[in-house]
Image (cartoon, rainbow, N blue to C red):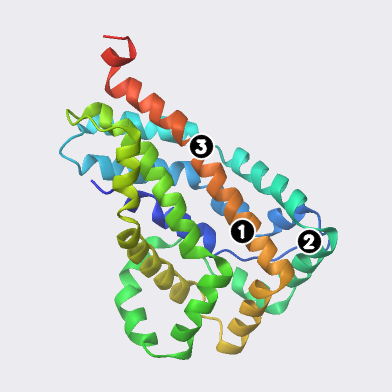
Amino acid sequence: MKLGTLVKPVLVAALLVSGSATAAPSAQQVLAASPVDDIVAQYPAMMSQGIREGLKRSDQIPPMVAETIGYVVSGSFRAADIERQIVQDLKAGLTDRQLEAVADWYESPVARKIAAADPVMWKEIKARAPALNEKYQGSDRARMFDRFDRAARATESAVDTSIAVQLGLATAMSAFSSDSVNYDQLKQRIESQRGAIRGIVEQQVYESYLFTYETINNEEMKQYLAFLESGPGSAFSRVVTDSIQQAITDPIESVGNQMARFLSPEQSNGQ
């Protein structure tokens, strides 16, 4: 079972965000003015539901067990904790001048227009993906993607986080398998899939990029890219993506331990 596919859409959503900001350039207010906090608020439910559905498709896990694991996951990730991590890191990682520049950008007409896009419409993105790929094939918008992806660190961060999540969940799932595999072996096995994972994630990021910014013309997109590549924009994107990645991966060990105890209680009791 490829657990990575359960979490990638959630990660991609977080990496495509933009928004409008208030005049005050504090870390808390800049975050609140952007849609980052709105998307983060959906993380626990989205991850839980995705993992439930993925496990139910596995022949290894009974539906009732899948539901219980989903419940454990939803209780292990709290939106408030993720937001707190982001604010803390923004305060430490950005100067007042950089925060002010980010706030100024979020007040711009282009940022307000981008804010109207909803990057968490995954059913619609999936349904429209073939048409979007065909529509933009060979276009300037398609050629801008590499520049966007580098500036936003979307694929890079999503791949790293996906591998960390897979490793944590795979460690727990090994307790339900007769195949004894230690942590180092699991890590090596999952790392060996990095290239394949990257290909899947990059395509998802690309299709989300085409969908999210479809109403933005090329000149407006260039302004957005210039912001992402600027000192303040780059710092903001880096801190937000790193904070989200850390906030997601940090609880994984705890999730894995809880799942292992549930799946193999006799081992937890020393039998």
Q: Earlier in the sequence, mark 3 or mark 1?
A: 1
Q: Residues within 10 Å of mark 2 (few under 14, many from 20)?
A: many
- The answer to whether any part of residue 124 appears in the image is yes
The local secondary structure at tag 3 comes to: loop
Q: Nearer the viewer, residue 13 or 270?
A: 270
Q: Nearer the viewer, residue 17 or 148?
A: 148
Q: Residue 100 appears in which quarter of the rendering?
A: bottom right
Residue sitting at x 31%, y 40%? 186
Q: CA distance from mark 2 to mark 3?
A: 27 Å
The local secondary structure at tag 2 comes to: helix
Residue, disc 2: 99
**Quadrant location, the C terminus:** top left
Q: Are marks 3 and 1 in contact (CB under 8 Å)?
A: no
Residue 17, given in percent of the width and then of the height, sits at 57, 63
Residue 79, given in percent of the width and then of the height, sits at 57, 41
Q: Residue 18 appears in which quarter of the rendering?
A: bottom right
- The answer to whether any part of residue 3 appears in the image is no
Q: Nearer the viewer, residue 91 or 195?
A: 195
Relative height, residue 193 to residue 167 (above, below): below
Q: Nearer the viewer, mark 3 or mark 1?
A: 3
* Three-letter amino acid code at the position of disc 3: Phe
Q: Residues within 10 Å of mark 1 (few under 14, many from 20)?
A: many
Residue, disc 1: 35
Residue 77: image tag:
3
Q: CA distance from mark 2 to mark 1?
A: 16 Å
* Three-letter amino acid code at the position of disc 2: Leu
The local secondary structure at tag 1 comes to: loop
